[in-house]
Image (cartoon, rainbow, N blue to C red):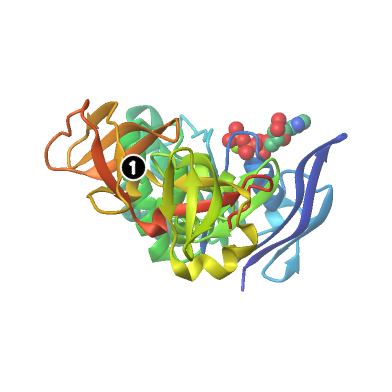
């Protein structure tokens, strides 16, 4: 079965290491997204899988076969790149069937593949048009179609939607998600956009400086980020980070910051015991605040209130730092007067200040 295994994969340009010993297994039929900031090595990793970039060290296996030093065409892959170039003088059908014609597939097979994929991508009515007669989104779909008509075991995408405007990108993202469910092939998708990663990926690989920071489902990354980097990278608006320490009083454990103390669930006491008194970073998801009062409520100033319909994004202050709060609200929340908030326990994340690992 065509699963992809990267073992201690390395890439250096001269003395500069850009991929630093990646270990990753992508299961068959899975939609894997590589995500991370610009320059972290996503494209380099994808290009090594594709065979377009030599490997400095380590091994790549596809379906159990060592392909580390094989030519791209021996790897049974299809690629879609950001800078797709369609053949301007060929119509959509000809563009899409190019690889199949080159491989001398028979005509009826080519036609049925092209029709099937065009149907899937909503391109049926454009098959006779030239690229110049298409919108940007339609062109991008043709580029995708050109890869999808092939019987490859694995599809590799490098930021294929980056040239589109926000609305079209959201639409294409949804189409791609539907399509990948339907065709059930291996997909490896590179993006620097965490929203794209979260909505498309069965599994997400978060990278930073040529290293993997965490691998998980979208929910795992959102709920249990392994470190400060992933916590700050995944989720919008971004998680708030506050300096603090762990302390115990009357048998209860608190995450204490400058002028506030958040009670932690008793079930976390045992695992956190060794960290009591240590410096920590407290991470609070903007969406885990809610309006309410009671013993543990925090009275917070509303510096700025942005009403975005159904939700309000508030700028406030806690522990001497500016924080973001997101609450659902039917009406705009006025700025000026302070309000009381509670924080859901699962919205409180703790990190070691030195190692930046989650506690
Ligand atoms: N031919 C090269 N020579 C030297 N360094 C290179 C070369 N190609 C890429 N790099 C470096 O390797 C690192 C990883 O590049 P890569 O293109 O994989 O990043 P990326 O994660 O895809 O970023 P982006 O989101 O901007 O596309 C970068 O720091 C880049 O400068
Ligand atoms: Mg790139």
Q: Nearer the viewer, residue 256 or 17?
A: 256
Task: Look at 68% across and 58% down and name the residue there.
Answer: 75
Residue 357 appears in the rendering: yes
- Left or right, 243 with respect to 296, comes to right
Task: Look at 25% across and 43% down and name the residue there.
Answer: 340
- Left or right, 331 with respect to 142, comes to left
Instruction: Tell me where residue 339 appears, x and y as whole percent.
Output: 23, 38
Task: Look at 58% across and 50% down and name the residue there.
Answer: 351
- Left or right, 72 with respect to 282, comes to right
Instruction: Tell me where residue 270 appears, x and y as whole percent.
Output: 57, 70
> Please, which residue is most extreme toward the front here?
250
> Please, which residue is most extreme toward the right here?
15
Task: Look at 38% across and 39% down and name the residue there.
Answer: 237
Instruction: Tell me where residue 291 appears, x and y as whole percent.
Output: 23, 47
Q: Where, by quadrant of the figure, is residue 25 drawn?
A: bottom right
For ligand 2, give the image quadrant.
top right
Q: Nearer the viewer, residue 55 or 276?
A: 276
Q: Quadrant of the C terminus?
A: bottom right
Q: Is residue 158 above or below residue 64?
A: above
Residue 32 appears in the rendering: no
Q: Which residue is mark 1?
A: 170
The number of numbered badges drawn on the structure is 1
* Mark 1 neighbour density, 10 Å: few (under 14) some (14–19) many (20 or more): some
Instruction: Tell me where residue 66 appears, x and y as whole percent.
Output: 77, 65
Q: Quadrant of the N terminus?
A: bottom right
Q: Nearer the viewer, residue 145 or 35?
A: 35
> Please, which residue is most extreme toward the left here?
331
Q: Is residue 211 above or below residue 218?
A: above
> Please, which residue is most extreme toward the bottom here?
1
């Amino acid at each position: 079965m065509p699963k992809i295994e990267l073992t201690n994969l390395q890439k250096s340009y001269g003395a500069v290491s850009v991929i630093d010993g990646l270990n990753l297994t992508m299961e068959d039929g899975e939609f894997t997204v590589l995500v991370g900031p610009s320059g972290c090595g996503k494209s380099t990793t994808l290009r090594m899988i594709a065979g377009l970039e030599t490997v400095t060290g380590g091994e790549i296996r596809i379906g159990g076969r060592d392909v580390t030093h094989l030519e791209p065409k021996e790897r049974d892959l299809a690629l879609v790149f950001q800078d797709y170039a369609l053949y301007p003088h060929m119509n959509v059908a000809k563009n899409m069937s190019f690889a199949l014609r080159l491989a001398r597939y028979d005509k009826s097979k080519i036609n049925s593949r092209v029709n099937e994929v065009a149907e899937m991508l909503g391109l049926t009515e454009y098959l006779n048009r030239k690229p110049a007669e298409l919108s940007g989104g339609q062109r991008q779909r043709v580029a995708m179609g050109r890869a999808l008509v092939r019987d490859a075991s694995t599809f590799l995408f490098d930021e294929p939607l980056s040239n589109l405007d926000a609305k079209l990108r959201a639409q294409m993202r949804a189409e791609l998600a539907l399509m990948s469910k339907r065709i059930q092939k291996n997909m490896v998708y590179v993006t620097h956009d965490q929203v794209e990663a979260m909505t498309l990926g069965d599994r997400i690989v978060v990278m930073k400086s040529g290293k993997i920071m965490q691998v998980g489902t979208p929910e795992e990354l959102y709920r249990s980020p392994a470190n400060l980097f992933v916590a700050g990278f995944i989720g919008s608006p971004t998680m708030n980070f506050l300096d603090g320490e762990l302390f115990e009083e009357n048998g209860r454990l608190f995450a204490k910051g400058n002028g506030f103390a958040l009670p932690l669930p008793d079930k976390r006491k045992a695992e956190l015991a060794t960290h009591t008194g240590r410096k920590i970073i407290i991470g609070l998801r903007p969406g885990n605040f809610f309006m309410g009062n009671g013993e543990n409520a925090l009275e917070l100033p509303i510096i700025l209130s942005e009403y975005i319909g159904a939700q309000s994004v508030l700028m406030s202050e806690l522990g001497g730092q500016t924080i973001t709060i997101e609450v659902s609200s039917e009406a705009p929340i006025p700025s000026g007067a302070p309000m009381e908030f509670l924080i859901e326990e699962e919205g409180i994340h703790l990190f070691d200040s030195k190692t930046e690992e989650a506690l």
